[in-house]
Image (spheres, grey):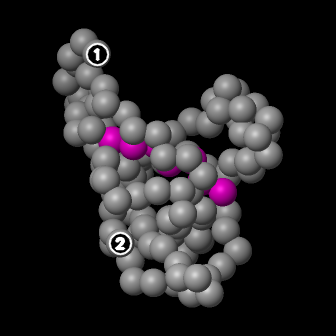
Amino acid sequence: MKIKIDNIEFSNFNDGVCNIFTTDEDEKRLPNKHTSLGFENRILGFKRFFEGNARNININRVIRIPQLGDIDNEDYVEIEGVPYGIKIVQPIYGTNPPSADLTLDKANI
């Protein structure tokens, strides 16, 4: 049961786990930055979909994770063995705990 408080959304990150990693200059995978990090699936809305298309960004998935300061759009997310490139990191401050939405595109690594 979620407790309802005005202007604060509670996130539980219970839709699955992911690993966040980066690669070196030769596109070789480096050790994970974060392992078994819980995430929450988000709905890909029309606005985000069409803004991505206008910028030639293919969007396959959007997830919400706890807010971590060391994640950027040069990192990758692995969910169920499938690597995704991070296209957009969007901090969300109206949640408890503070979180970030990651816009993902399947990667060929």
Residue type, label 2: Lys
Residue situated in front as seen by the camera: 49 or 73: 73
Residue tagged by mark 1?
Answer: 7
Q: For the N terminus, give its image quadrant.
A: top left
Residue type, label 1: Asn
- Seen as rendered, the residue at the extreme top is 6
Q: For the C terminus, give its image quadrant.
A: bottom right
Residue at the image point whose x is 33% and y is 41% from the top: 99
Q: Where, by quadrant of the figure, is residue 49 drawn?
A: top right
Q: Is residue 76 above or below residue 16?
A: below
Residue tagged by mark 2?
Answer: 33
Q: Main secondary structure of the magenta part?
A: strand
Residue 103 among magenta residues: yes
Query: Pointer 2: residues within 10 angstroms few (<14), some, or many (20+)?
Result: few
Badge 1 marks a residue whose secondary structure is loop
Q: Which x, y percent locates residue 96? A: 23, 34
Precedes in sequence: disc 2 or disc 1: 1
Query: Pointer 1: residues within 10 angstroms few (<14), some, or many (20+)?
Result: few
Task: State the extent of the magenta-drawn residues as a range.
Answer: 99-105
- Seen as rendered, the residue at the extreme front is 25
